[in-house]
């Protein structure tokens, strides 16, 4: 097995992208890519790459077939996240209806890591107050599509501005809607013109957080 194949194999086992590995060892993604593809057969930084991958330069270069002999322990996920300036964002398996969806329990949570800089494009909230959930239905079309992933900031639960999009609990169901305060209550609006608005009165509506981002498959 050549050097590039060994680098790629160990990198994939650690769940690192070429960009993440490159940033950790102070190289460019292109350099890692050339090593893995065999365009470049060697690197003066092989020891740094080996250390990041929890092995030795001797293993990567093919001098030994034992990746553990003389290797320093691979950095933990926490250490890697800190080095790469990544933050944890939870993804919950709860679908918010663009209409309404009954809440289901228990809710399973999966932790994902994202760049702090990327998250700051959407919200300045503590990452612990932010999570992803999936939208369901078409009443918020064309703004939100069925099965879009919604980034929800739970630190925002007060309607300081009208017509923003919120994740709410209404009459025991979860939904994503535009909200507009009125003298008669909170008007619940859909972006799909075929869906009529509703009005929530005192105690009927609970704001869970504001939708600050949408992730969509193309």
Image: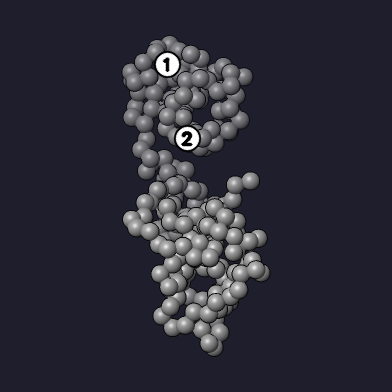
Vertical comparison of 75 with 91: above or below: above
Vertical comparison of 59 with 8: above or below: above
Real-space CA distance between mark 2 and mark 1, rounded to the nearest whole angstrom: 21 Å
Vertical comparison of 158 with 71: above or below: below
Which element is circle 2 on? loop
The location of residue 165, given as percent across then percent down, is 56, 68
Q: Which residue appears at 57% of the width and 16% of the height?
A: 41
Res. 70 image quadrant: top left
Q: Is residue 169 visible?
A: yes
Which element is circle 1 on? helix
Q: Are marks 2 and 1 in contact (CB under 8 Å)?
A: no
Res. 73 image quadrant: top left
Vertical comparison of 34 with 115: above or below: above
The location of residue 115, given as percent across then percent down, is 50, 48
Does 15 sit left or right of 192 as displayed?
left
Which numbered marker is on residue 44?
none
- Viewer-side label of 2, 1: 2
Which residue is the site of mark 2? 16
Mark 2 crowdedness (10 Å alpha carbons): few <14, some 14-19, many ≥20: some
List the single residue furthest toward the top. Answer: 63
Question: Which is nearer the eye, 85 or 100?
Answer: 100
Q: Is residue 155 visible?
A: no
Mark 1 crowdedness (10 Å alpha carbons): few <14, some 14-19, many ≥20: some
Q: Which residue appears at 47% of the width and 20% of the height?
A: 6
Which residue is the site of mark 1? 58
The location of residue 214, given as percent across then percent down, is 57, 56
Q: Which residue appears at 48% of the width and 60% of the height?
A: 96
Name the colour scheme.
one colour
N-terminal label among 2 and 1: 2
The location of residue 10, given as percent across then percent down, is 44, 26
Does 138 sit left or right of 134 as displayed?
right
Q: Which residue appears at 40% of the width and 62% of the height?
A: 103
């Amino acid at each position: 097995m050549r050097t590039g194949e060994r680098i790629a194999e160990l990198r994939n086992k650690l769940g690192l992208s070429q960009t993440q590995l490159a940033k950790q060892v102070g190289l460019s993604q292109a350099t890692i890519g050339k090593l893995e593809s065999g365009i470049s057969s060697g690197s003066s930084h092989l020891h740094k790459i080996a250390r990041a991958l929890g092995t030795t330069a001797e293993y990567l270069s093919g001098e030994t077939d034992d990746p553990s002999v003389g290797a320093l322990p691979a950095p933990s996920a926490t250490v890697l996240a800190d080095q790469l300036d990544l933050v944890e964002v939870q993804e919950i398996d709860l679908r918010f209806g663009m209409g309404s969806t009954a809440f289901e329990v228990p809710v399973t949570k999966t932790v994902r890591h994202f760049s702090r800089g990327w998250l700051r494009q959407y919200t300045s909230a503590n990452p612990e107050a932010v999570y992803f959930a999936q939208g369901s239905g078409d009443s918020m079309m064309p703004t939100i599509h069925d099965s879009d992933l919604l980034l929800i900031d739970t630190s925002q639960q007060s309607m300081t501005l009208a017509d923003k999009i919120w994740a709410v609990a209404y009459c025991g169901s979860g939904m994503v809607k535009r909200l507009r305060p009125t003298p008669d209550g909170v008007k619940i609006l859909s972006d799909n013109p075929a869906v009529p608005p509703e009005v929530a009165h005192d105690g009927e509506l609970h704001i869970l957080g504001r939708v600050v981002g949408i992730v969509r498959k193309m």
